[in-house]
Image (cartoon, rainbow, N blue to C red):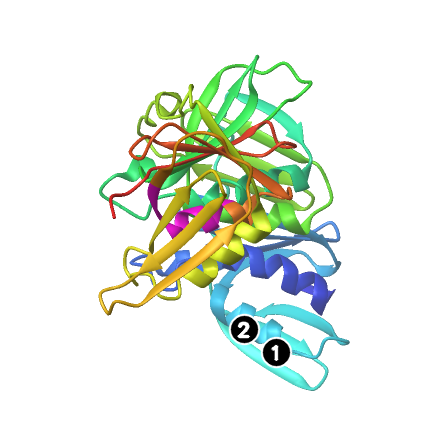
Amino acid sequence: MHLSISRASLLQQVQHCQGIVEKRSTKPILCNLFLHAENQTLKIIGTDLQMAISASVETKVIEPGETTVSAQKLFEIIKELDTDKEIELKTKDSFLVIKSGRSRFRLSTMGTDDYPGMPDDDTDMSFDLDSQQLAKMIAGTAFAMSNDETRKYLTGTLFETDEKLGFRMVSTDSHRLALVELALDASLEAVKCIVPKKTVIEMKKISEEQSAPVHLSLGVRQVRMQCGPYTLSSKVIDATFPAYEEVIPKQNPRQVDVSCKNLDQSLRRSMIVANEVTHDVRLTFTSEGLQVAAHNTDQEQAEEFVEVDIQGPETVIGFNGRYLRDVLSVVDTEQVSIHFRDELSPVLLTTTSESGSKYVVMPMRI
């Protein structure tokens, strides 16, 4: 293999592919990237056996060939090379020689016979959507994924399609829930799959970077994404997602419309003295407005006031302030609507322009 390529093109592709590769593995070849040069195209693949990413980039192929090389070392070298100089890659004996200007490196390689490569397509249904729409949907739900590995089904995001609801994404850690849906013109079959957190984050990175449409394929065993030069394939979590629709409050008699900016600023200031573990804050809904308060075991306290128009009796609800701020950080409207029943019932947050977005936050006793 022998080729010449711009540093910017190579760095971008290698960065995405090496991002999923394990730095240490019981199978050394899984620490490598697969490089295949042919027909003026360099194809790069990285995998951890659960997920795989391939990237294709146009290049000047002097001699076709393929090899595998340390993902981390290749990325670190390319990142440090001069930005305005071409990079030359050439295999010689059992090494990959990297040249750029007067810099020269030699890395050990391994054969390609044992490299897993990209898995075959094992999905059931596909559709297209805008890459920025996908990135926005992931941003609006990813924060609610759980880190509790004992409940694996909560550590990912539910991707769901239906002829009526379109495409929906749902995440929950049992303390809060985020739901975003998108109406699509295409006729969709009913498919549900739980996509692992690592895969969801990689999807977001690629979607944010690319302007090309996303071709998304879902199945009971695999999710697959194609966008620009990238193809991402991942196994899904083999579990049943909770019946999330039962958690979403259907009848909350009281609603408060509040400025996202004002509420977030009040929460941020109040949480300076809140408990460092529970981040608990107290929201008091009165006829005069909304009071935000917090205190700690040192008897320090904070009180804030946010102007809102509200009717009904005074209601005091405790929250984890971080959960509320997570929601406020992903909505892109000036106001958020808070729907509630009483001090102990789940609270629903919605926005006026994003009718397909719903956020549920469980109250806490304080």
Q: Residue at x 55, y 47 (%)?
A: 307
Name above or below for residue 102 compared with residue 351. Answer: below
Q: Residue at x 69, y 47 (%)?
A: 210
Is residue 358 in sight in this rendering? yes
Describe the element under mark 1 as helix, strand or loop: helix
Asked where in the image residue 149 lies, by quadrant, the reply is top left
Q: CA distance from mark 2 to mark 1?
A: 6 Å
Q: Are marks 2 and 1 in contact (CB under 8 Å)?
A: yes
The answer to whether residue 360 is left or right of residue 256 is: left
Q: Which mark is residue 80?
A: 1
The answer to whether residue 168 is left or right of residue 242 is: right
Name above or below for residue 267 compared with residue 134. Answer: below
Q: Position of residue 60 (x, y in %)?
A: 77, 60
- The front one of 177 and 219 is 177
> Where does the magenta region start and end?
317-327
Residue type at the position of mark 1: Glu
